[in-house]
């Protein structure tokens, strides 16, 4: 019996999400799900395009912002992360608390990773 966390299920989910996102390229929620699945699997560079597109088509909701912000921080793309922050401050200030928490978590994780490498 396949479990939800099995690699095969994530592969099928990623393929299905990619298919739907390609079919409906302006549907922000489909783009967000596609990018979120890529994020969950650790495919951060691949997650950038669908999450950025989701932000572009989501108008003032910024629903993809937390994932995209984390992806940019983890990829050390600080200017792009700043763009997400600025966009949220402009249209949905309620998300800035979540983004602060994500930034703190990513910073802690990067410090722990650096300590373990020594």
Image (cartoon, grey):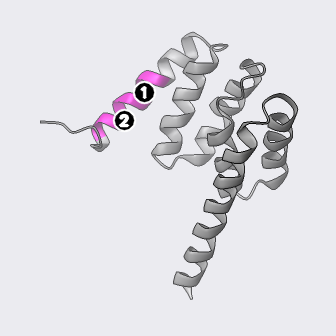
Identify which residue is drawn at 36% across, 35% down.
11
Count all numbered tags in the image, as a single digit.
Answer: 2
Q: Range of the magenta residues?
A: 8-17
Secondary structure of residue under mark 2: helix
Q: Nearer the viewer, residue 46 or 114?
A: 114
Identify which residue is drawn at 57% across, 16% down.
22
Secondary structure of residue under mark 1: helix
The quadrant in which residue 88 appears is top right
Percent across and percent down for residue 52 are 71, 32
On screen, residue 55 above or below 2: above
The residue identified by callout 1 is 15
Majority secondary structure of magenta residues: helix
- Answer whether residue 34 is magenta in the image: no
Category of crowding for the residue at label 1, using alpha-carbon neighbours closer than 10 angstroms: few (below 14), some (14–19), many (at least 20): some
The residue identified by callout 2 is 11
User: Furthest-bottom residue in view?
Assistant: 118
Which image quadrant: the N terminus? top left
Identify which residue is drawn at 78% across, 48% down.
81
1 and 2 marks in contact (CB < 8 Å): yes
């Amino acid at each position: 019996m396949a479990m939800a966390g099995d690699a095969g299920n994530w592969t099928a989910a990623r393929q299905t999400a990619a298919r739907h996102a390609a079919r409906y390229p302006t549907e922000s929620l489909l783009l967000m799900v596609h990018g979120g699945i890529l994020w969950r699997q650790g495919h951060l560079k691949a997650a950038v395009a669908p999450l950025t597109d989701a932000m572009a088509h989501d108008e003032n909701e910024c629903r993809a912002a937390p994932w995209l912000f984390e992806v940019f921080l983890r990829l050390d793309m600080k200017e792009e992360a700043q763009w997400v922050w600025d966009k949220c401050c402009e249209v949905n200030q309620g998300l800035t608390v979540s983004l602060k928490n994500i930034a703190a978590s990513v910073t802690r994780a990067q410090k722990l990773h650096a300590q373990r490498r020594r």
